Each structure stands twice: as structure tokens, then as C-alpha cells.
Amino acid sequence: MHELSMCNAIINRVRTAAEKNNCTRILSVTLEIGALHQIIPEIMDTAWQTVSNHTCADGSTLIIKTIPLTLHCHDCNAEYCIHTGIPRCPTDGTHQSEIIHGKEMNIISFEGE
Ligand SMILES: [Zn+2]
């Protein structure tokens, strides 16, 4: 359960941040997750409910912003996004590309009271 371990890491960080800010109840958490993590939103929601149960984030909403997988071609310097399949430069068809976006896993913000 990829999503569950991810949610566990997120809630630990959010709870620490909430304590520092004297926040006793978390209403929503906004995340930025790269497409490479292949998160399934429904599973992520269920995992979030599981880890937040009986914590200050109980009943909170998880807002996920997906960052598309973006690559940079070493041969022609093109930047391109792919959604499925094998990374291949649309300009010259090479596979000599480096991932520049899509690995993100950040907590952007959380709302609490
Ligand atoms: Zn290229």
C-alpha cells in the first residue's frame, strides 16, 4: 500500500506543523504529487481517512494537485510532458531524456483552527 505509507508520512509532518502553530483541528491538507507516484485519488482518500482517524486531522479533506511528468531531452533541449507510455522526445524520438517534474511529493499547505 503505496498510498498508505505516503499518507502516514504526510500526517506525521502535518501534525508536527499543527502543534507548532497551536492548531488543534486540521480541516484540509493540500498536496502536490508528481504523476510518477501514480497515485489513485480514491485509494489516497481512503488511506488518509485511515491514518487521520482519531487524530487532529480526523474528517479533514485531502486536496491533491498532480504535477504532470515533464522531461527534458538532452539531444535537442526540448521539454515535453507525457501521460502514458515510454518517455520519447516528440521532436527527435530519442529516449535520452531526464525527468524534471513528476517526482514531487510536497505538502503545500494545510488549513486548521
Ligand atoms: Zn529531443
Image: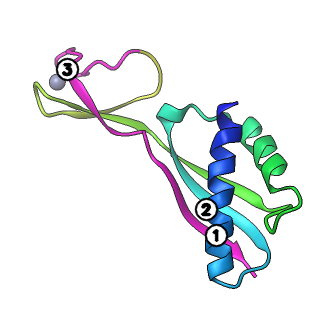
Residue at 14% in and 28% down: 74
Using residue 59 as the reference point, say whether residue 76 is left or right of it.
left
> Which residue matches tag 2?
13
Residue extending farthest to the right is 54
Q: Secondary structure at mark 2?
A: helix
Is ligand 1 within 8 Å of the beta carbon of the residue shown at mark 3? yes
Residue at 64% in and 33% down: 2
> Which residue matches tag 1?
16
Q: In the image shown, does 46 or 91 lie closer to the viewer?
A: 46
Query: Mark 3 and mark 2: span between their CA atoms?
Result: 36 Å
Q: Secondary structure at mark 1?
A: helix
Residues drawn in magenta: 86-113
Q: In the image shown, does 84 or 61 lie closer to the viewer?
A: 61
Is ligand 1 within 8 Å of the beta carbon of the residue shown at mark 2? no
Q: Secondary structure at mark 3?
A: loop
Residue at 89% in and 61% down: 54
Q: Residues within 10 Å of mark 2 (few under 14, many from 20)?
A: few
> Which residue matches tag 3?
96
Cβ atoms under marks 1 and 2 closer than 8 Å: yes
